[in-house]
Amino acid sequence: MSTELLTRRSVLKGGTTLAALSVLRVAGPEEAFGATGDEVLPWLDQPSTNPIPENLGNLLKWEDLDSRLTPTHNFFFTDHYGQPAQLDEPTWQVGVTGRVARPNVLSMSDIKARERHEVEFTLECSGNTGLPFFIGGIGNARWAGARLAPVLLRAGILDDDAEVIFWGADKGAVTIRDNSGILSAGQTGTGVPDADGGVDLTITEQFARSMSLRDALNPDNLLCYEMNGEPLPREHGFPVRLIAPGWYGVANVKWLTRIEVVEQRYAGRFMARDYVTIREGQRDGQTVWTFATVGHNRLKSAPAKVTRNNGRYSVMGAAWGDLIAAVEVRIDGGPWRRAGLDRSRSQRSGRHAWTFWNFDWGRPIAGEHTVTSRAIDIEGHVQPAPDDPFLASKRTFWESNGQITRRVLIA
Ligand SMILES: Nc1nc2c(c(=O)[nH]1)N[C@H]1C(S)=C(S)[C@@H](COP(=O)(O)O)O[C@H]1N2
Ligand SMILES: [Mo]
């Protein structure tokens, strides 16, 4: 059992946390999300068309959220190079290569012969910025597969401080501006030096992400071939993908073909060029820029829907990204008030899964209102407001976990 779980248990046992006080007495997870007779009010602020060029589908419509597990056919998907044309389970291979004593190749039957593990994990795209256009890049599923760590250990890692690259089968042409100037004259490649001596180098790049060996050995990581009890669908990475609970979507490499152990940091497109959080800050009176590859999930929540039942109104929502201690709701920018958390389901499989919450709004006066939520983790960290300096200093839209405000009309 992880330390986090132990801490959480003892904290709850003490009964001193707000989490313990705000537990909703509900029979099942779905009940926190509405009773029969509930009428869902539409949000006034519907997301506009997403200008992001990537292929995106099945985005979550928050008002429709009514089950803890997102049905597979409704689970958002995205890809950056299109789906690989050849996805054939009988011939599929996952190589384990690089700085290992015993490089090897796993077939799907090798992977499926290993002990099967499940993890419930809320997968969110790090580009799920918020309104106006991207709020539905999230879903929660029960993922199943073989644990990654024993596969790595069995191969015999040769460096303790190695990096592990996860390669997808999908690839595409990318153009990289190479300003190495003088080098470009003799450079072989498809590019031609321009007036500045730079070269637009076009290559075929495979989708890949890496993490430290330490992170890769996390026992929660899966070579995943099942989603909600069904074979992984093509769009979600059939026949096998990495599931790295606690990481943003991009780390969960689909159509996995190779696991490579290397000595150096990997600086491919999705580590070092795209999916990089760039911040502008001040240090000793100087402007400094920082660059960080998209990493672990961040504490976040969202109001899902407002419902009416017998003239009383409720706000329901979800919180995720960390171990949730409390959720607070504010109406029309007023005081923060505590929501009830749905703890009805054991957290056994839930430490990486979203927590549902419910706020009793009573009988608000007619008119337009705003509804904002914020999550608080078990260490007391509070989900930041969008104008929090940490978020406001961000110059790229990745990892935007700011509080979400929605608008609703009470008739
Ligand atoms: N091979 C591969 N894996 C990938 C991607 C991709 O384009 N190719 N996209 C990543 C991103 S950015 C996200 S958000 C998640 C989405 O997972 P899903 O499509 O199963 O929801 O897959 C990740 N894994
Ligand atoms: Mo993503």
Image (cartoon, rainbow, N blue to C red):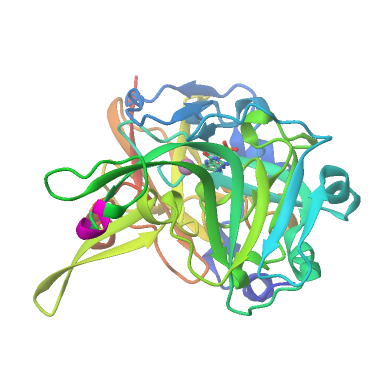
- Ligand 1: give its quadrant: top right
- Whether residue 389 sits left or right of residue 234 in the image: it is left
The residue depicted at 60 percent of the width and 49 percent of the height is: 167
Instruction: Confirm whether residue 357 shows in the render.
Output: no
- Outermost residue, left direction? 285
Q: How many marks?
A: 0
In which quarter of the view is residue 183 placed?
bottom left
Relative to 227, is 395 above or below?
A: below
Magenta: main secondary structure:
helix
Residue drawn at point x = 81 percent, y = 36 percent: 91
What x and y, as percent, mark residue 60? 51, 30
Residue 71 x %, y %: 67, 30
Does any portion of residue 21 appear in the rendered image?
yes
Of residues 329 and 238, the one drawn nearer to the viewer in this rendering: 238
Depth check: 152 or 206 in front?
206
Q: Is residue 138 magenta?
A: no
Quarter of the figure with residue 332: top left
The structure residue drawn at horizontal position 55% and vertical position 69%, both measured from the top left corner, is 17
Q: Is residue 143 above or below residue 154?
A: above
Q: Residue furthest front?
A: 186
User: Is 103 placed left or right of 235 in the picture?
Assistant: right
Q: Quadrant of the C terminus?
A: top left
Residue 370, percent from left and from top: 30, 36
Extent of the magenta region: 181-185
Tell me, yes or no, whether the highlighted magenta stretch contains residue 184: yes
| Residue that appears at 67% across and 70% down | 5
